[in-house]
Image (spheres, rainbow, N blue to C red):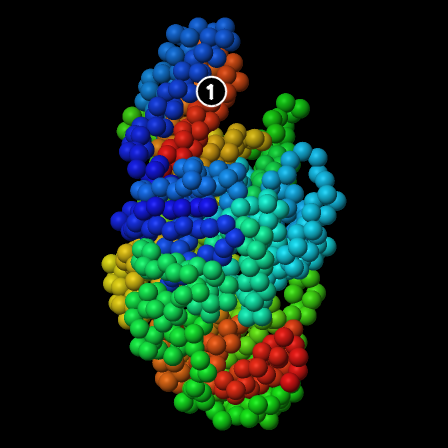
Amino acid sequence: MLELHGITKRFGAVTALDDVSLSVRAGEVHCLLGENGAGKSTLCNVVFGVHAPDAGAMRLDDRPFRPSGPADALAAGIVMVHQHFSLVPTMTPVENLMLGPLRGRLRRDEVAARVRGLMKDYHLEVDLARPVGDMSVGERQRVEIVKCLIREPRLLVLDEPTAVLPPEEIGALLAICRRVAAGGRAVILVTHKLAEIASVADRTTVLRAGRAVESVEMARADMRSLVRSMVGRDIVLLDRTMAATLGVATAAAPHSTALPLPARECPTSSPETARRPEDALVLDGVSFRDAAGTLRLDGVTVIVRPGEIVGMAGVEGNGQSELGMILGGLARPSGGRVFVDGRELTGRPPTEITAAGVGIIPEDRQAVACIGPMSVAENLFLGRLGRFTRFGLLRRRALTAAAAELMRRFDVRGSGPDAPIAQLSGGNQQKAVLARELSVEPLAFLLAAQPTRGLDVGAVAAVYDHIRAARDRGAGILLISSELDELLTVADRILVIYRGRIIGEMAAEPGNREAIGALMSGHAA
Amino acid sequence: MSRLAARPALAPAAVIPVAATAAGLLLGAGLVAASGASVGEAIGAFWEGMFGSTFAVGASINRAVALTLVGLGFILANRANLTNVGGEGQLAVGGIASTALALHGAERLPLGLAVAAPLAGAALAGALWGALAGALKVRRGTNEVISTLLLSFIGLLMVYWAVQSEDLLRQPVTSAATLPESLEIPARTKLPTILADPSSPLHIGVLIAALASLGVGLTLGKSASGVRLRAVGLNELAARRAGIRDGRLVVAVLAVAGAFGGVAGAIMMQGELWILKAGFTSGYGFDGLVVGLLARGSAAGVVAGALLFGFLRSGGLAMEITAGVPAAVVVVTQGLIVIVIAGSAILMKGRE
């Protein structure tokens, strides 16, 4: 149906796509596999008409296809779900759907009826009465998919749709993809997780550094060879953690320093008996009520000791964001107290929290950790500019030099310390954030919230290495993640958060996977 | 995106504002003709008003001084993504404070303090006016556009009040014909002129404006505060997390912007008006805001824009007085120039 011949796309000096050819057939799920920066998103954007290729041609149904913008692609029956959703949060799904393609008089009932039809056909569960802003990420994504399907497209492009989903919703999404393809439509699915491909793809094209290195029928595919194509080395050489992030890990061995804790529930572990002055972090019954009056955190008690990594498992939206805001000093708890290294930090401002030896890797890099248009150097030292001032003026050269040194130590790759941080890839941005937060001296406690989300394999391994190194230097670490594999590989013990409460604690052993998964979905063990 | 970037720049950044000004003036000439006045005479008067004499040049530069200070305050706050539209009110409270101090006590101060004390008082009053808007924003989330604008009206009405009430700054009422205005400020509190030529009104305000421009330019371009302001303007949450005290910074930068406005008001008062009257600010606050907007964040741009507007105002006044061109035409021409410059700026942006 859609054929790409020798597509090449350059951005300045960078060649994002280099002579890529592939074909997509009606009724198939075609996976694009590759690390971040391999050119997957660029390829999608070329198909969707966002970027015009510098060389090469596309054919749609054997006719030349040269979209001059997304409008052309839409007219040709190509729709795309982007990584970042475009929905109006205060409106319901139906209202959102009426914004775009439909003109003239509002036919709310008609649209609602069509939406219900689509939901039934594709088993898409969406609450039509609720504003989109109140929905989980997965539900919002389903609204986006409905928004695409209502156009009765011929080709549905999904750019990394599973990166934002909790584990139990991934399966449902993949099933939706299969059903869409079964109806004779084509689906292009972008991912960097092999496990997903195995369960959904008809064919897979592997991109590496802008080149299509392999294109195979899944029936005949060899997982090892796919991994080799994707990362350029053999799977046996892969670090166990890297394998885990690819979703090809078999039972991961327990971490060597994992505490031999038995699986147990601890909804009422009392801080008074357990608290010690040298604890890296003590959360003592922390509660948080949001502006709308909803209780987001309900008496959360957590103790992190120096030199241990405590994992916090949970489906997103169960209070992890609020916890991160409180620990970072961006929100004041409505109840309970926070101690780091024996010092009370409840409701203190970020400067004081940083001074107390707390590093924070926020879950939302764009919103909280980085200021995109500002340079890497400025981002790295924003809170410590005073160090680079003389007679009130900033010593740019010293700042740049210090940033270059930090970038070298943390292997942050990009065009240099003075380039805007937004130009770095996600992985390098995250490494820059790590560089900043881990250079808090002396680091007593580190919060890492979803630290590897959207990162490629190499960056993930680097993030884990840095977190472990901080642990080995004696910092206590709280790792909040919705990726169970990540927690099982990195954490020493795992707490489960559900609807703002800690509902259980487990040793980080592969054998506990099922039990932790059950707790995450609210089924008490 | 890249297709557009590949195009060569249309023209150096300086050419477009000049061309836009010329186009605006041309349109203005058309309006003059339409209003029935003689275009030749009007242009003659316009030129005479701007450059015709040392007085004309000095007066034009003095006008530019006030506009520069207000414009600098605007771009400073704008770096933190704050829109200070309160220039007019800040001028007003500055003028009141300066007049009050000049009439009550400053005269007897030694050295340059007779001049400096009213200026400092005006800076303080303006800073308070700006800080109020800042505190409202930080504490209550009030949009600074609304608060600074409303504070402007309050400031303007306070001038009216001050000159209406004998308990405040009105001159002693001796007859029914006594105007509602203050006494003239004492000679020692007036800004000294800097040229030996007695016909030139050019006063030391121009030095203050030059220093302020240098200071603002360095702050925005080369200081840590400039980086912090930009960070807060781009992403308040990330800036706060990184350890910038954003609330304090917002209040501080609006206070500084207000202080600039206040000093500008004092310079107008001590430089050439000498008597506080209702409406003495006569739109300088809003013109300064336009200057700041057109400068797009550059202190040098503010100076250039302020000079342009200062000379235009002088030329316009002369046109009005000697060539009989209606005042409205002058104002419309100024507006046209602003629109053409702003429009060309958008055009340039589109090409970038």
Decide if residue B202 is on the left or right side of residue B167.
left
Instruction: Please name the residue shown 39% across and 7% down the image.
Output: B40
Nearer to me, A321 or A234: A234
Vertical relation: A230 (above or below) A96:
below
Instruction: List the single residue furthest toward the front.
Output: A220
What is the number of callouts on the image? 1
Question: Is disc 1 placed on a helix, strand or loop?
Answer: helix
Decide if residue A29 is on the left or right side of residue A383.
right
Nearer to me, B76 or A13: A13
Picture coordinates of residue A453, whole percent (x, y): 46, 66
Picture coordinates of residue B319, whole percent (x, y): 44, 14
Nearer to me, B198 or A105: A105
Instruction: Please name the residue shown 48% across and 12% down the image.
Output: B31
**Residue A91 seen in this snapshot:** yes
**Residue A395 seen in this snapshot:** no
Decide if residue A461 is on the left or right side of residue A352.
left
Q: Quadrant of residue B160?
A: top right
The residue carrying pointer 1 sits among few (fewer than 14), some (14 to 19) or many (20 or more) residues within 10 Å by Cα, namely many
Vertical relation: A401 (above or below) A11:
below
Disc 1 marks which residue?
B333
Q: Chain of mark 1?
A: B
Residue type at mark 1? Answer: Thr
Instruction: List the single residue furthest toward the right.
Output: A109
Instruction: Please name the residue shown 34% across and 69% down the image.
Output: A225
Quarter of the image where the C terminus of chain A is located: bottom right
Instruction: Please name the residue shown 38% across and 79% down the image.
Output: A240
Nearer to me, B231 or A234: A234
Picture coordinates of residue A520, whole percent (x, y): 60, 76
Vertical relation: A380 (above or below) B294:
below
